[in-house]
Image (cartoon, rainbow, N blue to C red):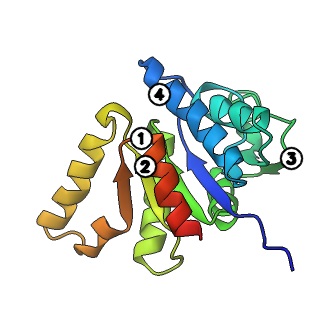
Amino acid sequence: MAMLQKSVCVYCGSRDGARASYGAAATETGEMLAKNGWRLVYGAGDVGLMGKVASAAQAAGGKTFGVIPVHLLDLEVGKRDLDTFIITETMHERKKVMIMNGDAVVMLPGGAGSLDELFEALTWRQLGLHTKPIFILNTEGFWDPLLGLIDHFIAEGFADPSLRDFVQAVPDITTLEEALAAALS
C-alpha cells in the first residue's frame, strides 16, 4: 500500500522584502520540499516570496497546492499552473483550507498576513485543534522580535510556557529540512 504524500503549509510574504537572503530562502525551501517529495501548500500567489517558493518547487518537480481568496486573485497574481488551485470566498476560509491540507507549518519572512496565518495556526495548536509541528525559518534573525514577543506573552502571564514548545525556530534550510524529516516520518 502506497503512503500518502506529506504536505507542508508555508506562510510567507507576498513581497520580496529588503534582503536577497529572503528570496533565496524561499527558493531553497521550494527546492527542498520537492527534493523530499513533500507537497507545497501555500497562498497561491505568484508574487514575492510566495511566487519564489512555488516556482522553485515546480521547477524541482514538486507538487503544489495553492489557496487564494477571490479578492486577492489580481493583487497576488493567482498562480493558476499549480497542481491544485483553490479559490475561496474569504481569507479565513483560505487559512482553514491551507492548514487542514498541511502536515506541518513553515513560516518564512513576511508581514502582517504571514503573522495572521501563523498566529491562527499557533492558537489552534494551543487549543488542541491540531497537533501539527510549526517551524519558523529565522533567516538572518528576521523573526527574533517575534520570538521575543512570544516569550514576553509567557513571562507576563498571558500564555502558558507550553506555547513556546509549539514553535520551533530554525536558522537555515538544512536545519529546517532535518526538523521536517523528523516531524513527518
The residue mark sitting in front, 1 or 3, is: 1
Name the residue beneath numbered marker 3.
83
Is the Cβ of the residue at disc 4 closer than 8 Å to that at disc 2? no
The span from disc 4 to disc 2 (Cα, nearest Å) is 16 Å
- Residue 165 horizontal/vertical position (percent): 32, 69
Front residue (pair 131, 75): 131
- Residue 8 horizontal/vertical position (percent): 63, 56
| SS at circle 1 | loop
Which residue lies at the image location 76% right of the left edge and 34% below the top edge? 73
Q: Earlier in the sequence, mark 1 or mark 3?
A: 3
The span from disc 3 to disc 2 (Cα, nearest Å) is 27 Å
Is the Cβ of the residue at disc 2 closer than 8 Å to that at disc 1? yes
| SS at circle 4 | helix
Q: Is residue 96 above or below residue 72?
A: below
Is the Cβ of the residue at disc 3 closer than 8 Å to that at disc 4? no
Which residue lies at the image location 54% right of the left edge and 76% below the top edge? 130
Neighbor class of circle 1 (other Cα within 10 Å; few <14, some 14-19, many 20+) is some
The residue mark sitting in front, 4 or 1, is: 1
| SS at circle 3 | loop
Front residue (pair 41, 129): 41
The quadrant of the image that shows the N terminus is: bottom right
Query: In the figure, residue 34 lies in which quadrant?
Result: top right
Under mark 4, the amino acid is Tyr
Front residue (pair 185, 65): 185
Q: Which mark is residue 172?
A: 1
Query: In the figure, residue 157 lies in which quadrant?
Result: bottom left
Q: Which mark is residue 175?
A: 2
The span from disc 1 to disc 3 (Cα, nearest Å) is 27 Å
Is the Cβ of the residue at disc 4 closer than 8 Å to that at disc 1? no
The span from disc 2 to disc 1 (Cα, nearest Å) is 6 Å
